[in-house]
Image: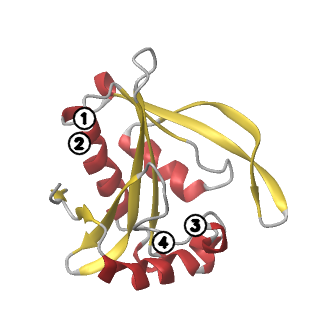
Amino acid sequence: MGGMAGEHVVLRPVSADDVPVLLHIISTPEVKQWWDAADLDAGWPLSDGSASTRFTILAGRRIAGLIQYWENDDPRDRHAGLEIFLDPDLHGRGLGRDAVRTLARHLFGERGHHRIVIDPAATNEVAIRCCAAVGFRPVGMMHRRERHTNSVRDGLVMDLLSSEFG
């Protein structure tokens, strides 16, 4: 698969050359609090055995972050989920919204999904605002959803339906 262009970003499959920059971004305190690089499997993000499809987010020629999706292919509940992280130096510029919108367009149009879910930590206001700006709406709370460092946190489930995406 080639790249997907948004208004301000391009999403392209992760390459080996991207790994050092992505590892640096995921290790920044602002990202690490949500994505702990110590928890990543060997080979991440290229060959860690994950079922996720990953893209490097480019803003111009700069690696801005990573966005990934997974798919549930059960015919009774076929849908996709996504996750994203962005270089903290680039927060507040609309790049995350553009990346989420670009991937959503692909998942609805090319992959044929009718629903996309995301479940950020309930306290991750940056991710929640980003996804809400694209049209994701809260569905419910998953209490004690994930262990992170020395704590357990709640997750906010949000979804976006193809019929509501514009």
In three-dimensional space, the C-alpha distance between marks 1 and 4, rounded to whole angstroms, equals: 26 Å
Position of residue 82 in the picture relative to residue 109 (left or right): right
Q: Name the foreground residue: 106 vs 2.
A: 2
> Looking at the image, is mark 2 or mark 4 nearer the viewer?
4
Q: Which residue is mark 1?
A: 111
Q: CA distance from mark 2 to mark 1?
A: 7 Å
Dot 1, crowdedness within 10 Å: few (<14), some or many (≥20)? Answer: few
Does the CB distance between marks 2 and 1 fall below 8 Å? yes
Towards the viewer: 131 or 143: 143
Q: Earlier in the sequence, mark 3 or mark 1?
A: 3
Q: Is residue 147 above or below residue 163?
A: below
Q: Secondary structure at mark 4?
A: loop
Residue type at mark 1: give it. Answer: Arg
* Residue at disc 2, secondary structure: helix
Q: Nearer the viewer, residue 77 or 117?
A: 77
Residue at figure coordinates x 42%, y 67% from the top left? 92
Q: Where is residue 135? Give x, y as percent.
A: 39, 37
Which residue occupies the extreme right position in the image? 150
What residue does disc 3 label?
Answer: 41
CB contact under 8 Å: marks 4 and 3 = yes
Q: What residue is pinned by disc 4?
A: 43
Q: Quadrant of the C terminus?
A: top left
Residue 106 disc label: 2
Locate the N terminus by quadrant.
Answer: bottom left
34 to 141, vertically: above or below: below
Residue 104, above or below 76 = below
Q: Is residue 14 visible?
A: yes
| Mark 2 or 3, nearer chain start | 3
The amino acid on which the numbered mark 4 sits, given as a three-letter code, is Gly
